[in-house]
Amino acid sequence: MGKMCVVVGATSAIAHATCREMAKSSWDFHLIARNSDKLATVVKDLKAFGAGEVSTHIASLEELGRQTEDQMVQMFENIHDVECILFAAGVLGNHERALEENKYCEGVLQANFNLPLLVINKWANILEHQGRGTLAVISSVAGERGRQSNYIYGACKAGLTAYLEGLRNRLFNKGVHVCTIKPGMVMTPMTSHISPSPLMAQPRLVARQIYSAILKKKNSIYTPGYWCVIMAIIRSIPEGIFKRLKL
Amino acid sequence: MDKETQSWGRITKASHRQIPIFWQHEAEKMIAERSDQTVLAYGSGRSYGDSCLNDQGCLLMTRPLDRILEFDRESGIIDCEAGVSFETLLDLIVPAGWFLSVTPGTQYVTVGGAVANDVHGKNHHKMGTFGCHVEEIELVRSSGERIICSLNQNQGYFAATIGGLGLTGLILRVRFKLIRIETSYMNIETIKFSNLQEYIEIFEDCDQKYPYTVAWIDSIAGGDKCGRGHLICGQHALKSSHQSLSVSKNVSLTLPFELPSFLLNKLSVGAFNSLYYHRQRAKSSKSSVHYMPFFYPLDKVLMWNRLYGKNGFYQFQCTVPKSDPGALSRILKLINDSGLGSFLAVLKTFGEAKSPGILSYPSPGFTLAIDLANKLQKTDKLFEKLHEIVLDVGGRVYPAKDAKMMPEIFHQSFPNLEEFIKYKDPNFSSSFWRRVTDKN
């Protein structure tokens, strides 16, 4: 039996690419996603790349959020010792539409902040009870500083990043590690409407860095790594100047 | 939203609506929604001319269809989505002791593209084309119909799709066979030859001894040095000499900007070619290298096509019958005289292996592939003369490289065109197709 990774949002490009890297080292998987056709294809790919046992669960983030304590415990009992939980659910959403339609805005907040937080809240207890494991959650560089083109999504990710810092703090003495992953721009279906630029990274490059971070138990990573420099610059711009920019 | 797309030669630019296909089950819907325009699949865009472009039409971007569906590590059969690149395949198959049966000179092509152009490699004389190793293709037509084709099922579609330039529909999935390897290394022998005549004397022996043979030739040297070069022969190294089945992860450089076009001219290229020819002192030299530099020497420099500057470049690849080596000589002399040759000129022999593809390009003979600088009218005139020779000797020109051929050459290269047309999808089209036929 290999090491077990539970993946939320398994059909997302970054999650799938990361699982592929893990599959090469024969990890086992419990994959959770909304669409069964897509998930079936991902399972085939991971098996071809060397994955061990692969089980699946079709569920949306809302359904996971509504799980009772019993249902959650049952789900984890059916899969053996969890080495890693990779949380990759979220939507970029349309910023202009979120500004105008409250209902739509609520959906963006739910998908990127409320639901992930509620689910991770409960699942963290499973890992704490186990006394070991890594929780790797995909946040974003967008959470580092609110900017006019993207601040609703950015606010969600900022909140998520802060939540994960606190969780990392709480779980440190319990033998559980929390890794915050902050990708920059990655070429995925979520960004397909954005014109390609040299800053757009391939999912497989980002995936290798995420897998490495999980293995090395990094606290938080930017991926690709050069975003560390870009964000340091962005953060250092005085607000008096930043508020005039059109980023 | 229309985007400008280029092919590898960076000459033909065309304007398209680009529609990415992320999942197989979305394909029918995405194609049906575009019924007002013709469509064409676009993989990695490594074709040099306009066979991967569909000006004013729609391009179905297939790179996201990059999943492996099944890999039988015992039998070496692999089934994957059409957007999987050869690079991804090698990453998976090499550590498991398998290699591609046929590969072109870059690993950045997609499986769909390899089928659509029925690509060939250094081992054509032993293994034929990529299509010779394909077992099954799944195709989606603009009607929404899915067709699974093979040598035993929907054979007409199978034959039309291999080498069919993406015109029979969207290739979704391909199943094909790999070859066993013991190590990821190649034993190579490089033989220096002083002109074309000498190449003709030695190639047959090398083709018999080695599964992989290709010659680099100096396209600038003239007179009695015309056609001088290195014949590079290779075979997979056995476990007795090496132990490793590694995929090379060497960092590649990217050419970050295009070079000014005056940098590549007869003098600079001539000088480079001369140095390169003489870098090997001995007549024959043997060595052992990782498969990467043997099969994919140019992949080390990403975006190397920018070397040719903003005017881009053409690739001319033709085949002439072995019975007429004089034709090859005349072609080389024309290129020498024009001064438009570059450092990338490759000569190979095609064997007798027959591909199942109707529009498959390789036919027995000598094939010359050469980059030609785009010096506008000068290059146009050269192409006219080159095409005259090819027409004259009953030769062929390769669509995957072409941006210039006239309809007569296309019809001569592919006499079974009418058979192919029966299987062409009415809603799929390309700039190339419209250029060489009077059809849509």
Image: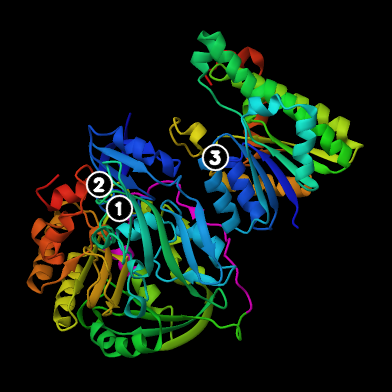
Provide the secondary structure element on which disc 1 rests.
loop
Left or right, residue B126 beside residue B369: right
Q: Is residue A236 visible?
A: no
Dot 3: within a 10 Å radius of its alpha carbon, few (fewer than 14), some, or many (20 or more) residues?
A: some
Residue at x 27% of width, y 90% of height: B201
Residue B25 pos. (x, y %): 42, 41
- Nearest the eye: A108 or B199: A108
Residue B200 position (above or below residue A179): below
Whether residues under marks 1 and 3 lie with C-beta atoms below 8 angstroms apart, the answer is: no
Name the disc covering residue A36, or none. 3
Judging by the rendered image, the residue that carries numbered circle 2 is B12
Whether residues under marks 1 and 2 lie with C-beta atoms below 8 angstroms apart, the answer is: yes
Left or right, residue B215 beside residue B65: left
Q: Are marks 1 and 2 on the same chain?
A: yes
- Chain letter of the residue carrying label 2: B
The residue range painted magenta reads B243-271
Cα distance in 3D space between marks 2 and 3: 41 Å
Name the disc covering residue B9, or none. 1
Left or right, residue B199 beside residue B22: left
Cα distance in 3D space between marks 1 and 2: 7 Å
The three-letter code of the residue at mark 1 reads Gly
Provide the secondary structure element on which disc 3 rests.
helix
Residue A4 position (above or below residue B20): below
Residue B8 pos. (x, y %): 33, 52
Provide the secondary structure element on which disc 2 rests.
loop
Dot 1: within a 10 Å radius of its alpha carbon, few (fewer than 14), some, or many (20 or more) residues?
A: many
Q: Quadrant of residue A56?
A: top right
